């Protein structure tokens, strides 16, 4: 009886696991299309983001199905998509992360997001787009962003100025800028 019950449960699990895999593949295709469009807007015109979902029926049942899910990226034309961590530079990785966050921003479970120089390696119009995407992301959560680009900084609701002091020991202070100080700081960044 136990053997028969185990076989029935395993068959039911495999059917449910296959349904889950099919749903993941469909949603993964939609997600990869949206993220690919977003990374192209963020200065990677030939960029492709792929969601690879591979299903294996033969594996031992797992709590979240029998899929292996991997994010792949091709940043340049003619190059095959490879795992995200192995392909993207620091600046590309930051922009891909931003694209993922903006694309999935309806999920409000992350109350605060921190981006450290997400605008690394870009400038001009792309920097402005990055700033706009960060601002959009801040509509339903707190976003902290370290930037040296005025195009990004001007999109912020508030500015904090970080100053390093190296007298006898090194220390840092953080000041909230008022409207006039914000204008002066953005002007300084432009200079």
Image (spheres, helix red, strand yellow):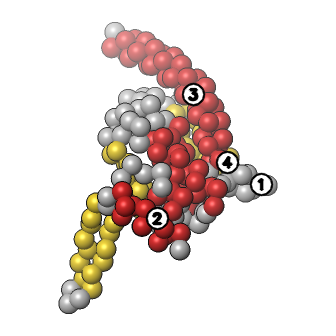
> If you read the primary sequence from the N terminus, does the residue marked by circle 1 or circle 3 appear first?
3
Are the residues at dot 4 and dot 3 in contact (C-beta closer than 8 Å)? Answer: no
Q: Between label 1 and label 2, give the one nearer the viewer.
A: 2
Q: Between label 4 and label 1, give the one nearer the viewer.
A: 4
SS under mark 1 = loop
> If you read the primary sequence from the N terminus, does the residue marked by circle 1 or circle 2 appear first?
1
Q: Circle 2 is placed at which residue position?
A: 186
Q: Tell me the residue at 20%/90% (across/down).
A: 168
SS under mark 3 = helix
Q: Nearer the viewer, residue 90 or 125?
A: 125
> If you read the primary sequence from the N terminus, does the residue marked by circle 4 or circle 3 appear first?
3
How far across and down, in percent of the image, does residue 38 sit? 61, 43
Q: Tell me the residue at 62%/30% (across/down).
A: 30
Q: Which mark is residue 77?
A: 1
Q: Quadrant of the N terminus?
A: top left
Q: Nearer the viewer, residue 150 or 14?
A: 150
Q: Tell me the residue at 26%/74% (across/down).
A: 172
> If you read the primary sequence from the N terminus, does the residue marked by circle 3 or circle 2 appear first?
3
Q: Circle 4 is placed at which residue position?
A: 40
Disc 1 residue crowd, few under 14, some 14–19, many 20+, Cα 10 Å: few
How far across and down, in percent of the image, does residue 164 sit? 30, 77
| Figure label count | 4
Q: Circle 3 is placed at which residue position?
A: 27
How far is mark 3 from mark 2, CA to CA? 41 Å
Q: Would you say residue 177 is visible in this rendering? A: yes
């Amino acid at each position: 009886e136990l053997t028969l019950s185990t076989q029935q449960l395993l068959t039911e699990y495999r059917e449910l696991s296959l349904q889950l895999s099919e749903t993941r593949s469909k949603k993964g295709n939609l997600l990869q299309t949206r993220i690919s469009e977003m990374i192209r807007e963020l200065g990677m015109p030939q960029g492709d983001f792929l969601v690879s979902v591979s299903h294996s029926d033969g594996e031992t049942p797992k709590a979240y199905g029998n899929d292996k899910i991997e994010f792949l990226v091709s940043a340049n034309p003619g190059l095959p998509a490879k795992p995200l961590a192995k392909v993207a530079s620091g600046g590309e990785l930051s922009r891909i992360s931003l694209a993922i966050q903006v694309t999935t921003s309806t999920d409000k479970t992350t109350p605060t997001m921190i981006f450290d120089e997400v605008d690394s390696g870009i400038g001009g119009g792309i920097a402005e787009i990055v700033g706009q995407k960060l601002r959009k992301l801040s509509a339903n959560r707190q976003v902290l962003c370290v930037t040296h680009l005025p195009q990004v900084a001007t999109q912020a609701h508030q500015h904090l100025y970080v100053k390093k002091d190296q007298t006898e020991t090194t220390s840092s202070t953080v000041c909230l800028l008022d409207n006039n100080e914000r204008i002066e700081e953005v002007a300084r960044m432009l200079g």
